[in-house]
Amino acid sequence: MKHFISFIQKESRHILRDRRTMLILFGMPVVLMLIFGFAITNDVKNVRTVVVTSQADHLTRQAIDRLAVSEYFDITATVGTSQEAERLIRSQRADMAIVFGKDFASKKSGLQFIVDASDPNMAQQWTTYATQTIVNPQLSTVNSKMLYNPQMKSAYNFVPAIMGVLLMLICAMMTSISIVREKEKGTMEVLLVSPVRPLTIIIAKTVPYLVLALVILVSILLMARYVLDVPLSGSVVWIIAVSILYILLALSLGLLISNISNSQHMALLLSAMVLLMPAVMLSGMLFPIESMPPVLQWLSAVIPPRYYIEAMRKLMIMGVGIGEVVREVIILFIMTALLLAVSLARFKTRLE
Amino acid sequence: MMNAIEVHNISKSYGKVTALDDVSFSVGRGEVFGLIGPDGAGKSSMFRILCTLLEPERGTATVDGYDTVRQMKEIRRRVGYMPGRFSLYQDLTVLENLEFFATLFGTTVAAGYDSIKAIYSQIERFHDRKAGALSGGMKQKLALSCALVHSPSVLFLDEPTTGVDPVSRKELWDMLETLKERGITIVAATPYLDEVRRCERVAFLDHGHLRGIDTPDTILDRFADIFNPPGIEHGKTTGAADENVIEVQHLVKAFGDFRAVDDISFSVKRGEIFGFLGANGAGKTTAMHILTGLNQPSGGTGTVMGYDIRTQYEQIKKRIGYMSQKFSLYEDLTVAENIRLYAGIYGMKGKEIARRTDELLQRLQFSEHKHDLVSSLPLGWKQKLAFSVSIFHEPGIVFLDEPTGGVDPATRRQFWELIYDAAARGITVFVTTHYMDEAEYCDRISIMVDGKISALGTPGELKRRFRQPDMDHVFTHLARQATRNSD
């Protein structure tokens, strides 16, 4: 036990004395949260809109007013013909045009959208929003209700994803580098020659990073709740419990990487390329898994962040009980056990 | 009485390379035993096998009566091991390092204090300094304290003194002798002959084969061609010897309050081999950085190749060559690619590079290795090649910063033949070294102590002036006066 404590003490000193790394470790979550929360959003806001109408009947007026007061659209011009509107879009002075036909009021036809679709996803969203805004709820046959995220804020989607990627990166990268550094500097040789059991060395190495990851987890959750207004609908205890399981998984991955690599930059590359890229691309963080080709869907099935992000979305945003995320938790648990077993089996008590 | 170490028919190979081939020897309890041999002889592999870090392919070994393969745990409790590189945590303080290693071996600093007192008391006043900020000699004392804190019965030292100045090396070996009195068995590898002579018996390993075990003098005599090559004749250069290529007056470099270089003045003539000696932390490297334009002086004036070191360093850089022990060649490029790269940096034309490359490789009898990766070459060859590359563009002066660290005497002698060759062609050689036999090879020597030059002259003059038999004694005599104790 004494070994263990002095190991943890030594490891914590390494971490605390490396100011720059500390700054990055704590700065990165904050910066990422702020960037994703405020700067990069898929939210529809202030779309520059041209209204095309020659009528001034009551229903058209009402529709235009609804557009004008919504925060989604900015009416920048009102013109007479759709040709003029198209010209405005082509000259980059408007994003979409809404053309009210002569018989709009009589409900027969008469509504056309002209949209700058250079970003197809956004174009799709604008038309949906515009339709909902214009169509008179009393007369409409379609009525949609947004569950869990009525304002459709993208922060709801990004916060679990950032947690998934950041925790993976920090835990796996930092542990693997700290072990490989000892190999590189030659101190590992002396540690191995000592009577301390290799298992003790390994566990003691990971404990400070577990603590560090928890601190980061809590700061992300606090920021999500109080800065980005993301609700923590579910039980905080379960959110943290599932996160700890995921952190353990990431730490085991870090151990595995440290077994394979012989230099710090190798460990860094492995964690960045092998962990970060798939985590971002295939976990469903950026692109929905359902719309991937089958091959990529199979690949994404072995990406741990996928299940963690899924579980966090359910627990944090949907606020369901732990019973609804049993599948994800079991998968994460099996992955952790496998990785831990492999990396402990591969850990060498001698040199090659 | 049982021997402390028994080695029976040990063999070990890495892929195609045979590191150890059927090696057997035994070391008595309380003996100081030397493992010597050129780079790549298999010394480190032997240490690792004895420390239970490696499994031998064939043969058996016991340490303190325990088998290295089956009774790993027992051995790991009883040995102290100091690998060549300082196995310390650079970002922990002296005391933190010591405490950590003490706990690691199930003891405390207080309990182990008696066994390390002689060594640790010398660095104890720096106990809250980071290990990374210590000088080479002090790091070594700390590493030794860490290896001894649990009172091991056998101590393994794998080239513990590489890159350490002669005074610190002598102190270390004085300490090892006190350990012997306490009955600790010591196995040490070293490239230094004075250290070899302090062992009771030595084993000479060469390419994995055990060539002989005997007293140091017998071994050194029997293999004199390797360990004690005849001195080289230095044909005096004829060129315009009165022209100064380096002139320095009252040079000062201060970092805050600390004057790393403290008012030094000297000059070096064209074609001269100028030895620039000093203990670790005496200010040699800083002075060399100023001369090569890597650093600006805080005070004083100087010229190199006629150019001002303050303002015309770009001109200076074009006319000098530089080789250091730390960085010499790119390991992942081939021999030819390295030469091409450096020649290209100095603006040589493609055709000329190709022609001169072939010439050079022929002269070094190296042509067949033209397309080999540098990482596959032995250390001695790398150093020769690195030197040849550093003078490939025919510079006026070449600066060599500890060019021969960790190499056996025969290889170092070959290296010096190359240096004499270069000097004969009119290239001035400015060299730092910790090997005092190399100091004897220089035309003139300066010895720096605490940032100042405390002696300057030919080796003969210095020996007469300080009434010492050789350069080793001259150096020790001067460096002992140092008050500064760290880098």
Image (cartoon, coloured by chain):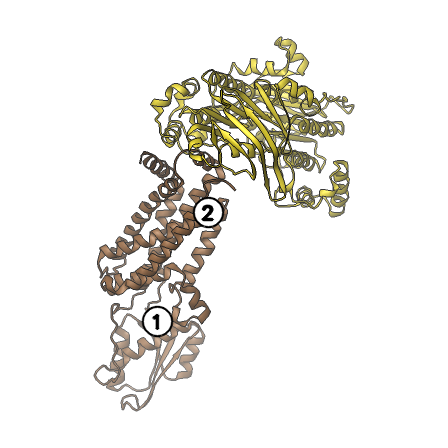
Chain colours: A brown, B yellow
Q: Residues within 10 Å of mark 2 (few under 14, many from 20)?
A: some
- The residue tagged 1 is A47
> In the image, which disc is placed on residue A259?
2
Whole-Å distance between the Cαs marked 1 and 2? 52 Å
Examine the image and state in which quarter residue A146 appears.
bottom left
Q: Nearer the viewer, mark 1 or mark 2?
A: 2
Q: Residues within 10 Å of mark 1 (few under 14, many from 20)?
A: some
Please state which amino acid type lies under the numbered disc 2: Asn
**Is B6 in front, or is B76?**
B6
Of labels 1 and 2, earlier in sequence is 1
Chain to which the residue tagged by mark 1 belongs? A
Left or right, residue B331 beside residue B427: left
Note whether residue A241 is visible: yes
Percent from the top left, x then y, of residue B427? 72, 29
Residue projecting furthest to the top = B467
Residue projecting furthest to the front = B1
Q: Residue at x 52, y 42 (%)?
A: A352
Examine the image and state in which quarter residue B476 appears.
top right
Please state which amino acid type lies under the numbered disc 1: Val
**Is B30 in front, or is A278?**
B30
**Disc 1 on helix, strand or loop?**
strand
**Is A271 in front, or is B475?**
A271
Chain to which the residue tagged by mark 2 belongs? A
**Disc 2 on helix, strand or loop?**
helix
Percent from the top left, x then y, of residue B403? 63, 30
Rendered position, A65 above or below A36: below
**Is B235 in front, or is B14?**
B14
> In the image, which disc is placed on residue A19?
none
Note whether residue A170 is visible: no
Left or right, residue A212 beside residue B447: left
